[in-house]
Amino acid sequence: MSAPVASQTPPTPIPVTILTGFLGAGKTTLLKRILSEPHGERIAVIENEFGEESIDNELLFEDTKERIVEMNNGCICCTVRGDLIEMLGSLWERRRSGAIQFDRVIIETTGLAEPGPVAQTFFVDDDVAERYMLDAVITIVDARHGPDQLTQHAEAQAQVGFADRILISKSDLVDQAAVDTLRSRLLRMNARAGVDLVHFGQTPLQQILDIRGFNLNAALEIDPAFLDAEAGHSHIDDVHSFVFKSTRPFDSDRFEGFMSAVSQAYGPQLLRYKGVLWIKGSDNQMVFQGVHMLMGGDVGRPWQQGEARQSKLVFIGRKLPRDTIIRGLEQCLV
């Protein structure tokens, strides 16, 4: 009689943080700190470059030309100028074989691009989606040059729009009024991202790791009233955010059909959209999120007895037709 086959528990996905920000914002400074300090974390850092040469690569790796380098504090540093999926697969196989050890991944994106394509990697490839979990997008904004970069470069605005957490760097180079003005501008562009200061890469790792911003495991906290405070706002940014709230439940089929149409019509303009939904007939919250034309929903926690049921959705994108989307969502309510 043969022994019963033991069921295999799927491996716990490796959390991934995407670190983005415009050129000179301070991404490499933060990464050098992560790669050198004795923080006790085993982290694989991937530098995602698209050019032939990488100055950041030299700053991080100094004289080495290796593609995967183990640091003396347990971190691993990698470069990828081709397929990010291939690099993630290579890291996974080397970890599985015991050749290297790491518990999480941080990906630094190039400063001249939006992080959307990198984020989409974790949803379009089955192996990557099974092995890795996108935890959050962290965006660094330069207090000195950030305001002009946001005005002049659509990529800088997109980086803010994708963010789950925003870090303002180089605040010592400007006065407090300038920092406050920048903070207000960033919050108007992305109402759901927390904003903190970072000084020469010195920020507690708990501010950027395991925040579950992308997966929305925690409650979605948005202050819609802040978005109404437009008085004195002198910047006309292409990227903006708005919030939809309702104390009436959604009809599931109507909501799915409408959002499918929205993603088809405005996919390139939709940077992030996510929320917690009250669906008619369900005793659980529905957690919904999307990036460009990719979207999906998961069953969330049960509604508690006595808890006020409501839906709350935030949209972040470029020149979105706010009134059209809100009217359409209202038509999806029971």
Image (cartoon, rainbow, N blue to C red):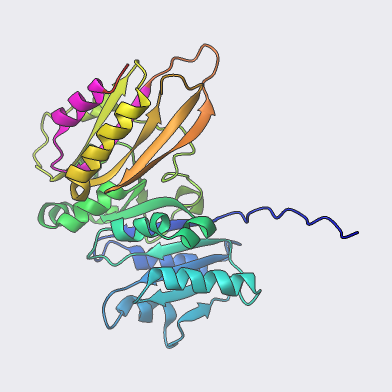
Percent across and percent down for residue 98 are 66, 74
Give me the residue at 47% from left, 68% from top.
88
Which residue extends farthest right? 1
Quarter of the picture holding the C terminus? top left
The vertical placement of 154 against 46, above or below, is above
Front-lying residue, 67 or 273 = 273
In this figure, what is the number of numbered marks? 0
Q: Which residues are magenta?
A: 311-331
Give me the residue at 25% from left, 26% from top.
329
- The answer to whether one can see residue 272 in this image is yes
Residue 49 lies in what quarter of the image?
bottom left
Give me the residue at 25% from left, 28% from top.
226
Percent across and percent down for residue 178 are 19, 45
Front-lying residue, 63 or 173 = 63
Residue 204 is a magenta residue: no
Q: Determine whether, in the image, residue 283 is placed left or right of residue 25.
A: right
Percent across and percent down for residue 265 are 17, 43
Residue 11 lies in what quarter of the image?
bottom right
Percent across and percent down for residue 319 are 13, 42
Which residue extends farthest top? 306
The vertical placement of 281 against 46, above or below, is above
Give me the residue at 32% from left, 54% from top.
139
Residue 320 is a magenta residue: yes
Residue 17 lies in what quarter of the image?
bottom left
Front-lying residue, 244 or 64 = 244
Quarter of the picture holding the N terminus? bottom right
Q: Determine whether, in the image, residue 69 is placed left or right of residue 260.
A: right
Front-lying residue, 266 or 212 = 266
Q: Determine whether, in the image, residue 165 is placed left or right of residue 106.
A: left
- The answer to whether one can see residue 75 in this image is no
